Amino acid sequence: MKTFIERLRQFTILKVFTIYLRYLIGGGFIMPGMTKMMGNRFTTLSTETDVGAFFEALYQTGMYWQFLGWGQFIAAILLMTQRFATIGAMLFFGIILNIYIITISIEFTGTAFITFPMLLAAIYLLLWDYKKIIVLFQRADQIQVNYSEDKDEFLYHPWWIVLGVLLFGITLFYALSKMSRTLTGLAGFLEWMLVCVLVGFFGLVLFLWTKRKMIFNSH
């Protein structure tokens, strides 16, 4: 299994996929996280429905509702920084597993088709960083950590941190604008999504163009 994962980690396309998957998941967690952090309701569904009653009960807890928001927000930041993405992936796994169990427990209509792929994405990110996590399951006298050979200039390039901070800033601006009703509805969402896609695309193109020798030497 380890050998198989290590082989996959050599493919540039999977490195890019992993980096941008972190951006995607992190960006998707910012808005719902901030909504809870600021003490706002997440949904306007009637409390006569199971889903509406569930969210209203969570909202009425007050501090716990905001705690959930902070958890999502912090996980998003850690994922998007790339530098602390492993910690973010561990937090995200716990959160999305909890959300998935809730969606199938009270039968959110169609929501499980969204949360299940997100759960698979969390598992993928944990497997990708298995070397940083596996030591948690070893006895202290068996732990042998050697990262001297793990010097992937592509995966750990500072550019991904810069791009992550930029995408986080854009998403944060959108979230605050939505809360202040500067941007609302589908048009605001599409504008945010388009800006993030363009920034992410041109950020990748610029990096590949400046580091093309690295790409050609990659397996």
Image (spheres, grey):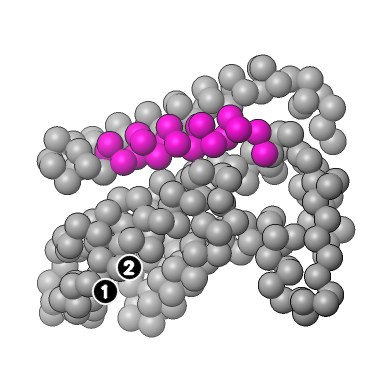
Q: Is residue 22 visible?
A: yes
Disc 1 on helix, strand or loop? helix
Of residues 208 and 135, the one drawn nearer to the viewer in this rendering? 135
Tell me the amino acid under the disc marked 1: Tyr
The circle on residue 215 is: none
Crowding around mark 2 (Cα neighbors within 10 Å: few <14, some 14 to 19, many 20+) is some
Tell me the amino acid under the disc marked 2: Leu
Of residues 90 and 108, the one drawn nearer to the viewer in this rendering? 90
Crowding around mark 1 (Cα neighbors within 10 Å: few <14, some 14 to 19, many 20+) is some
Q: Residue at x 38, y 60 (%)?
A: 72
Left or right of 195: which side holds 219? right
User: Mark 2 and 1 residues: CB-CB less than 8 Å, in contact?
Assistant: yes
Of residues 132 and 194, the one drawn nearer to the viewer in this rendering? 132
211 relative to 168, above or below: above
The circle on residue 68 is: 2
Task: Give the image location of residue 88, x and y in percent.
Answer: 52, 57
Task: Give the image location of residue 214, x and y in percent.
Answer: 78, 25
